Image: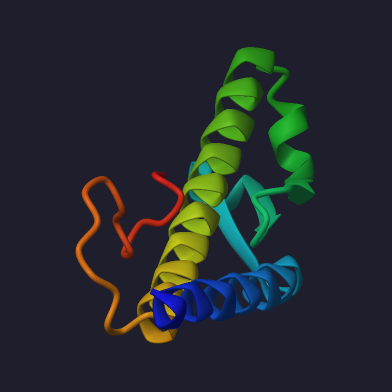
Amino acid sequence: MQKVLAQIEEAQQKIQRIQQELEQKTVTEESGGGMVRATVNGKTELIELTIDKETFATGDAELLEDLVIAAVNKALHTASQMMQQELGAATRAAMPNMPNIPGLDLDNPFGE
């Protein structure tokens, strides 16, 4: 039991390190063929939004709103997948001999 608790503590420390590293990683997604680009960090925070100037010239506010929503949602989804993969890998590596606990998914430790 003490070995399992030590593995859990080690996994928690590794997860904290990875979460700090994820803050520095970014993903960028676009919509409208590059008319709108959204950049999100590994903590799923929107850190940059770029809108092509020609997009404003159309005067179509509804189109622009849709493009912003699409780009941000794509970037958030990609960042979430990146976070899940890295944290899942860290959890599996830190606790390779973890017994099967019902409801605990080491590949998806945060249920996302």
Report the residue at 24% width, 56% height from top: 101
Q: Is residue 60 left or right of residue 8?
A: right
Front residue of 64/98: it is 98
Report the residue at 48% width, 73% height from top: 5
Q: Is residue 45 left or right of residue 91?
A: right
The picture places residue 64, in percent across and down from the top left corner, at 65, 26
Front residue of 25/110: it is 110
Quadrant hosting residue 63: top right
Colour convention: rainbow
The picture places residue 102, in percent across and down from the top left corner, at 21, 49
Q: Is residue 39 above or below residue 11?
A: above
| Quadrant location of the C terminus in the rendered image | top left
The picture places residue 85, in percent across and down from the top left corner, at 41, 68
| Quadrant location of the N terminus in the rendered image | bottom left
Front residue of 56/2: it is 2
Quadrant hosting residue 29: bottom right
Q: Is residue 29 above or below residue 90?
A: above
> Number of numbered discs present?
0
Q: Residue furthest front?
A: 1
The picture places residue 60, in percent across and down from the top left corner, at 66, 17
Report the residue at 52% width, 80% height from top: 6
